[in-house]
Image: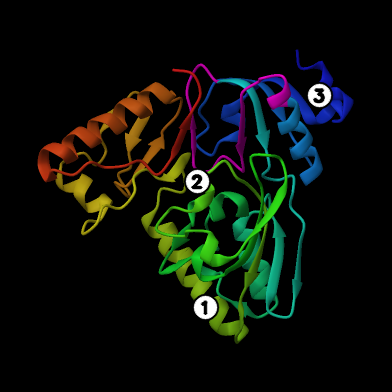
Amino acid sequence: MYSELFDFLPRERIRINEPMKDHSSFKIGGPVDILVLPESVEEIQRTIHYCREKDIPYFIFGLGSNLLVRDKGIRGVAIKVGNNLRNFSIFNEEIFAEAGVRLAELSQAAADYNLGGLEFAEGIPGSLGGAVVMNAGAYGGEMKDVLKEVRAITPDGKLSSFKPEEMKLRYRGSIFQEEELIVVSALMQLRREKAEDIRARMQDFAKRRREKQPLEYPSAGSTFRRPSGFFVGPMIEEMGLKGFKVGGAEVSRKHAGFIINTGNASASEVLELIAIVKAKAKEHYGIELETEIKVVGEE
């Protein structure tokens, strides 16, 4: 069924029954039928065209840093953009980068060129593409502040450019979530600053991350979106759930806004723990917590 993929992709970039736990920062997830590792926009377009022509379900992801794959895995094709499309260039105060570049790498590169504006991203583990889709942010900064243009593949397989006013960027949201659009590159507008000021902010953010976030455990970052007027970590702590476990999944003792994999957690354990936290939040605060992580795969 999948043999025609070999007509336009090298065999070493097609993996069969690939464990998704090896492609997720959570280190959780069953196998995907076929994992494709494209190295160009054209290869993404051809893979999508093939899947649509054959009526094969497909899923696109970056570095898997905001992803929970269910235990039975993913049927069809998963297309991994992260670590593959990772070219970037800097000209004057602009950075053009492909979607697979690590956001933290771009932050460091910008600092090397005395360009400010991406300091908030120094410790964000995901790819640029995922960061654009989620309008990722931290410490008062977000992608919305720097994006000048984004290129994405549209549902009909063509490349289209989006200006900031067309992106619908908001807290952890964008048009790229709402519609079937695949981000392949972005142009970012930064600003010239003193190197010592940029580095000082980055060092401060890195220190704060190390002190407050459970970086020593696999996770998918912040588990829940921040509800209006509340901070999730203190909410969960007040409900007495800090350190609460279901199997190998635990509400972090360091930061209750994170659910971590303490060893061999399954996706079902993580999802059960999420359900418990959500039910408690509804009971205590009357709030419907929404997850920030993307859950995919067969139940």
Q: Which residue is mark 1?
A: 200
Residue drawn at the location 72% of the way across and 50% of the way down:
159
Residue 125 seen anywhere in this rendered image of the structure: no
Mark nearer the N terminus (1 vs 2): 2
Along the line of sight, the residue nearer the viewer: 207 or 50? 50
Along the line of sight, the residue nearer the viewer: 22 or 60? 60
Quadrant assignment, res 131 = bottom right
Q: Which residue is mark 3?
A: 5
Q: Position of residue 169 (x, y in %)?
A: 47, 60
Q: Which residue is mark 2?
A: 177
C-alpha separation, residue under disc 1 versus residue under disc 3: 48 Å
Disc sitting over residue 220 in the figure: none
Whether residue 234 sits left or right of residue 139 in the image: it is left
Magenta stretch: give its range. 51-73
Does 77 sit above or below residue 125? above
What colour scheme governs how the chains and residues are painted in the rendered image of this protein? rainbow
